[in-house]
Amino acid sequence: MIYDLEDDYLYYYTLMLRLLGMLVLDVNLINEYSMSDLLSRRPSFDLDEYLSNPLSAFDEDAGKEVSRYIVDGLNIRTVYYRYHLLREMYENANA
Amino acid sequence: MHDSNLLDLYNFISNIVSINCDTDYFSSAYANAYQESLSHNAMGIIGDQKVVNTPLRSHAMLSSASSELYPVVDRTLDTLNCVVSMTNPNKILMEDHSVVMQVIKENNPNSEIHFINSIYLYELEKHFGEDLSSYTSVKKTDIINGNFDNNYDIVIVNLSINLFDELFIRKCYDHVSIGGSLILTDSSNQGLLYTYRKNHYLYHFHKEMQGWPGAKVSHFTNGIPFSVIRKEL
């Protein structure tokens, strides 16, 4: 096989660390500002409007920020699943 | 037409096209395909909740002719093949679902094909029984770290799989030769791009790609949507 399990496993390991690093930065951001501060930094954000119509609640820039948080969360979960799968494969291969 | 207008137009059309797909077709098709994938233990494929986001789920979706999604995938592969054929590539680099890689490989027998080292390559060799010993695999870490000096006419990368690694996608674009294309398959995040539109991260990522040197971005909505970033400079 030309597939290299060890390299694939290493890639996901380092990627997960990179994403976790991003998450820590986000947590620091949240610690630095209170949630109300964060929300007030988005002048077009309206929670009631968001709940009734998610598409219109954010302006473009704020939408980018919010979707970025969502995607980061999904990313870390996805990468963790993949990392976990590769780790199992790697450990089985080297058992 | 200016690129940004073009992207808006594509997104507008995509949204119209996807309204029915999202509600009437795709949701049930994905749900059925997912259930189908969970029963694929007999094929030696892990059907476990924890790997729901791995290629193994997609393997079932793409490879089973009984899946509701199959005609959609079929149409997507036709369009993808059409785009690749128009480029008439001498060299191809790819990481996508095993079925896609297999189809591209079979339809481009005269092209030099390199595979990005990933679990999809493992699948292709292990479950599809492909003998790829005469082919070259390229490590992702080498692409990211720049330990790799090669240009390709076509680079195919699955965006949904690699969404978490923008750096990798950008490095892949750097390895596209002038006149070549980076093809990002599955680039609508299962239709969520059309639901959330400007509030979806991928909308902004497409905008960002328009700013890459020489990049001309197009978004195809036929079948499972994909994007083509043509390098013109």
Image: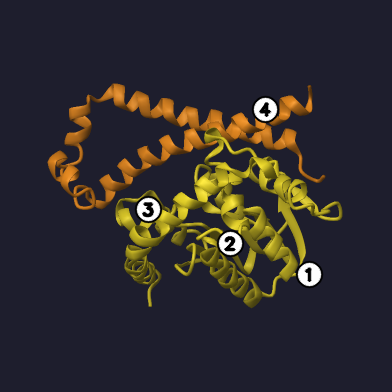
Q: Relative to A89, is B59 on the left or the right?
A: left
Pointer 1 and pointer 3: residues touching (CB < 8 Å)? no
Mark 1: amino acid: Pro
Q: Which residue is mark 3?
A: B192
On what subunit does the disc labeled 1 rest? B
Q: Relative to B213, is A73 on the left or the right?
A: left
Q: Are marks 3 and 2 on the same chain?
A: yes
On what subunit does the disc labeled 3 rest? B
Q: Which mark is residue A88?
A: 4
Q: Residue at x 72, y 24 (%)?
A: A91
Q: Give the Cα distance between marks 2 and 1.
A: 20 Å
Q: Could you say whether the residue bearing mark 3 is in a helix, strand or loop? A: helix
Q: Which residue is mark 1?
A: B109
Chain A's colour is orange
In this orientation, which residue lies closer to the viewer: B48 or B121? Answer: B48
Mark 3: amino acid: Leu
Q: Give the Cα distance between marks 1 and 4.
A: 35 Å
On what subunit does the disc labeled 2 rest? B
In this orientation, which residue lies closer to the viewer: A49 or B41? Answer: B41
Please name which of the two marks, 1 or 4, marks the residue nearer to the observer: 4
Q: Are marks 3 and 4 on the same chain?
A: no
Q: Relative to B89, is B55 on the left or the right?
A: left
Pointer 1 and pointer 4: residues touching (CB < 8 Å)? no
Other residues around mark 1 within 10 Å, as few (<14) / some (14–19) / many (≥20): few
Which numbered disc flags the more N-terminal residue, 2 or 1? 1
On what subunit does the disc labeled 4 rest? A
